Amino acid sequence: MEKPICPKCDHVKTVKSGVVGGRQRFKCKKCGYHFTVNKLGKSIDKYYVIKALQLYIEGVSYREIERILGVSHVSVMNWVKQYKIKAPESNDYRPTYRVLNHTELVKFMANKENLLDTGMLITELGDKFMIIKWERFKNR
Ligand SMILES: [Zn+2]
């Protein structure tokens, strides 16, 4: 789980400092300010919900999503239900995905071959980037 930044001085280094009223309390390492965060990790969860649902809509299986994102396939199934997501049937294109770091992404883009006859979406994934690619006219 990511640690929150200090609401007083915006310093990024904060440490856990006990639990108050059921909420995790943090202390800023720079200015010493104490603060609590409502629901820890909520934004991170949302982040992965969106990534998972993107992949689901692209026709990636639950198990594959689990492997790519490291979130349980059961969670993904629950999100699909919760948000009433319906993946359209996709018969005429094949979605592929890959996870690259920035250097690999630059190399990938430098190769024009990778950009021909395809559509793609690049989305941040933690400290890396995920490319979802549609190869409509290529062999399956
Ligand atoms: Zn501070």
Image: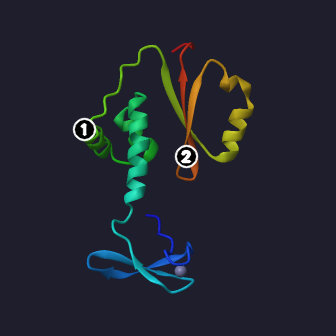
Q: Which residue is mark 2?
A: 124
**Which residue type does callout 2 highlight?**
Glu
Q: Is residue 89 above or below residue 131?
A: above
Q: How is the image coloured?
A: rainbow
Q: Residue at x 73, y 25 (%)?
A: 112
Task: Reply above or below: 76 against 60.
Answer: below
The answer to whether residue 117 is left or right of residue 96 is right
Question: Helix, strand, or loop for circle 2?
Answer: strand
Q: Label 1, on which residue?
A: 81
Q: Amino acid at mark 1?
A: Lys
Q: Residue furthest bottom?
A: 32
Most foreground residue, 37 or 91: 37
Residue 102 percent location from the top left of the image: 66, 46
> Taking 133 as reference, is 25 above or below it?
below
How far is mark 1 from mark 2, CA to CA?
24 Å
Which comes sooner in the sequence, label 1 or label 2? Answer: 1
- Report the residue at 32% width, 42% height from top: 76
In the drawing, what numbered circle is on residue 96? none
Please state the horizontal and vertical placement of residue 97, each as a whole percent of the image: 52, 33
- Number of marks drawn: 2
**Which residue is at 55% across, 13% downward?**
139
Binning the other alpha carbons within 10 Å of mark 2 as few (below 14), some (14 to 19) or many (20 upward) gives some
Ligand 1 lies under 8 Å from the Cβ of mark 1: no
Given contact means CB atoms under 8 Å apart, are the residues at marks 1 and 2 in contact? no
Q: Secondary structure at mark 1?
A: helix
